[in-house]
Each structure stands twice: as C-alpha cells, then as structure tokens.
C-alpha cells in the first residue's frame, strides 16, 4: 500500500535540513505539524532516515569511500568512534598511518573553495594512471575551506608503505581547473615496541 500523495510535498533538501536540525524553530514547528498530518511526507522522511542509517553504518564500519561533512564527523566522534585525523595543507603533504584500534581515518584537505560550484576528487595510488579513481560532484563546504573524506579501513590497513596523490578539480564548461594537489605518505602501523 502506498502513502497518499501530498498536495504540497516537502522538498528532499528541506527534509534533510529538518532531520539534521538545521532549521530555525519556527520552520521546524511548521514542518512538525505537516509531518504529523501527512503520511506521504512522513514516509519520505523515514526513507531518508533509513538511507542515512545504512550509509552511516557503512561509513562507521569503514566499508566505503565517502566525502563527509564536518558535522557528520563530529557526530561520529560524539558517538565514541576512535577517529584518526590528518589535516593536509593546501598543495601539501602528510605522513600517515592507522592504528589497530582506530575506527575511521579522516583526511581533511585544505583548499580555496569560495566561488567553486562543482568539485571532483581524484586519487592516484602507486599504480599511476592505472590506479586512478575519481569521485565526481563531491560535497564540500566552501566557507570551511576543506574537503573531508574517509577510505575503507580494510584497504588502508592492508596497504604497504606507499604514496597516494589526491587532486581536487573544479569542472566547468570552459574546462577543468586544478584546485589543489595533496600527497599522503602512508606507512603501516608500528607500535612503540616496533611491532
């Protein structure tokens, strides 16, 4: 059985803002009333919550590549996940590793993002161009001046000593513009006793 249609459905972006608690009190109260009386919009909100829960579980499990918001990272930390974070300066590099008890590896790439409408993240591993991955239209917060992402922990833990290069690219009708280049020098974890 499907939910009856709504004459004025709440847009998905607004439902997301509602769920994340990003609306002012008046607008939130307005939506509360609508959602209580509208099974169509309530079902849409529940679908969004279910989807976010599945994606969130996969991210928390370190099972997928994901570009994240800072708010999402803060929520993960508040839930007690052990986050290893690296801040990479614009066009800079960092030495990195993951410890056995780390739940997630968070990488923050500083970048001049004001005025950018679309952004792609390109990653080149040790295999050169044959080891190229590109994530298109990644979310970013231009005012924060950074892109935050995580990689699957199983893949990171299995890496030998390696160098990974990341590029942020702004696609546009007139062509692509390089926004920043970053180098991650990964080493497998070694405890203080050398193991």
Image (tube, rainbow, N blue to C red):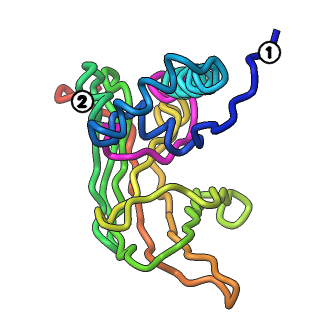
Which secondary structure, mark 2?
A: loop
Q: Quadrant of residue 73?
A: top left
Report whether 18 appears left or right of 158. Answer: left
For marks 1 and 2 on the same chain, the one whose residue lies earlier in the sequence: 1
Q: Residue at x 56, y 76 (%)?
A: 170
Residue carrying label 2: 194
Residue 67: say if magenta. Answer: yes
Q: Residue at x 45, y 73 (%)?
A: 181
Q: Position of residue 42 (x, y in %)?
A: 58, 21
Q: Position of residue 99 (x, y in %)?
A: 31, 29
Residue carrying label 1: 2
Quarter of the image where the C terminus is located: top left
Quarter of the image where the N terminus is located: top right
Q: Residue at x 39, y 46 (%)?
A: 69
Q: Quadrant of residue 123?
A: bottom right
139 up-or-down from 89: above or below: above
Which secondary structure, mark 1?
A: loop
* In front of the other: 189 or 114: 114
Q: Position of residue 146 (x, y in %)?
A: 34, 62
* In front of the other: 56 or 50: 50
Q: Residue at x 44, y 45 (%)?
A: 68
- The number of discs equals 2
Residue 4: say if magenta. Answer: no
> What's drawn in magenta, residue-wise?
58-73
The outermost residue toward the bottom is 174
* In front of the other: 105 or 98: 105
Disc number for residue 115 = none
Report whether 127 appears left or right of 78. Answer: right
The reply to whether callout 1 and callout 2 are in contact (CB within 8 Å) is: no
């Amino acid at each position: 059985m499907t939910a009856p249609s709504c004459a004025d459905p709440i847009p998905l972006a607004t439902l997301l803002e509602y769920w994340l608690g990003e609306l002012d009190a008046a607008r939130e109260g307005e939506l509360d009333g609508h959602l209580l009386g509208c099974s169509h919009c309530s079902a849409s909100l529940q679908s969004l919550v279910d989807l976010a829960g599945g994606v969130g579980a996969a991210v928390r499990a370190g099972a997928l590549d994901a570009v994240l918001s800072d708010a999402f990272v803060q929520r993960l930390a508040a839930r007690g996940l052990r986050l290893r974070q690296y801040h990479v300066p614009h066009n800079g590099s960092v030495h990195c590793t993951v410890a056995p008890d780390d739940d997630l590896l968070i990488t923050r790439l500083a970048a001049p993002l004001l005025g950018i409408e679309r952004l792609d993240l390109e990653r080149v591993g040790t295999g050169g161009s044959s080891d190229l991955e590109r994530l298109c239209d990644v979310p970013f917060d231009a005012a924060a001046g950074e892109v935050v992402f995580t990689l699957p922990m199983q893949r990171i833990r299995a890496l030998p000593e390696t160098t990974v290069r990341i590029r942020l690219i702004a696609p546009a009708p007139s062509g692509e513009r390089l926004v920043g280049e970053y180098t991650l020098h990964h080493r497998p974890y070694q405890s203080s006793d050398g193991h």
